[in-house]
Amino acid sequence: MEGPGRALILGIETSCDETAAALVTDDGEIRANVVSSQADLHARYGGVVPEVASRRHLELVAPVVREALGEADATLDDVDRIAVTQGPGLIGALLVGLSAAKAIAWSRRLPLVPVDHLRGHVASLYLRPDPLEPPFLCLLASGGHTLLLDVRGYDDEHVLGTTLDDAAGEAFDKGARLLGLGYPGGRELDRLAREGDPAAYDFPVARVPGLDFSFSGLKTALLYATRDLSPEQLQARRADLAASYQRAIVRALVARVREAAEQSGARRVAVVGGVAANSELRASLPDAALAPLPLCTDNAAMIASAARFAHRLSYPAYLGLDAYASR
Ligand code: KG4
Ligand code: ZN
């Protein structure tokens, strides 16, 4: 189609329960972004079953890559490097994406760029049409992580704070479960909270030293508030409970972001990760750079985006790469 300018990065992401492929240009334009969620498959178990996830990734990864190429009106001839999530995540799930990426790169003799999933989330901010430039202070809040990062450069960030127990998304998911909402529960809880009174319950959030977070006590407080209610009472109070619980999580996140911004003197604040999709959190940080909604939860465009700033491994150096479960 186009001439020499058409050098696309093919991104592949399979760290948890989303099988995703994307095509992104070197200057950060998304040409295709396909996400196939397995959420329905895991819903009946109330959480992701790793072995089930790996098997599903195996079925989906090739069709999802093909669909992304179709969406971009491209072929593998237009791809000049393969980007893939190397970790952290579910090891079996990661290995499916990594093996697929190696196979494609090997068959075309293309370079491969292993990407850290958390850097990928941050790189969701570097895409067009509204790319952000470091430095900035970044809250990364997802199902597996809650981090405050001092992002100094595209491949240079320092952890200022982290959760001592549950991640913010995990707190949303566990709260949603106690309220009888489906899995994953963050989005459902967000929706239900809009119908409730956030001042109905006063849920405490533990204040831990420094810039760290703690959410496990909050979940226990919700458990205590719900366990003595009859099913009818729970039904009647569900929206209030959701609104109050969400308010507590959002307040804790926002308070830490503000403290960190003050301490680090950051002029710009950004929010990424699945929890960045939360409507109350977004409204509570009106001046922050927020990851675009479709790029908050796991996707491969952010992985391809991160690859723009990362070291590429040429053939055959990447064939021995292994995935990692945690950082
Ligand atoms: O980034 P992500 O897709 O996966 C991980 O890397 O963990 O984040 C998923 C998390 C889940 O815990 C989900 O419940 C939460 O993000 N989430 C939300 C919302 N949408 C997704 N939490 C609160 N409000 C939302 N609207
Ligand atoms: Zn993620």
Image: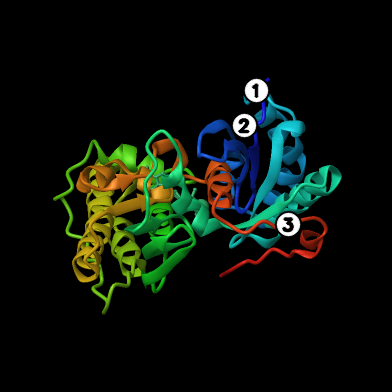
Q: Residue at x 26, y 48 (%)?
A: 288
Viewport quadrant of the N terminus:
top right
Give the image location of residue 58, x and y in percent.
76, 45
Residue identified by numbered label 3: 95
Viewport quadrant of the C terminus:
bottom right
N-term-proximal mark, 2 vs 3: 2
Q: Is mark 1 within 8 Å of ligand 2?
A: no
Type of amino acid at the residue the image marks with label 1: Glu
Residue extending farthest to the front is 4
Give the image location of residue 244, x and y in percent.
22, 51
Q: Which residue is drawn at 28% across and 51% down?
A: 246
Residue extending farthest to the right is 107
Type of amino acid at the residue the image marks with label 3: Leu
SS at mark 3 in the image: helix
Type of amino acid at the residue the image marks with label 2: Gly
Give the image location of residue 318, x and y in percent.
77, 60
Residue identified by numbered label 1: 2
> Of the numbered discs in the image, which one, if any, rests on residue 5?
2
232 or 74: which is nearer to us? 74
Location of residue 311 by image quarter: bottom right
Q: Is mark 2 within 8 Å of ligand 2?
A: no
Q: Residue at x 44, y 45 (%)?
A: 126
- Is residue 234 something that shows in the picture? no
SS at mark 1 in the image: loop
- Is residue 12 something that shows in the picture? yes
Gap in Å between the C-alphas at discs 1 and 2? 7 Å
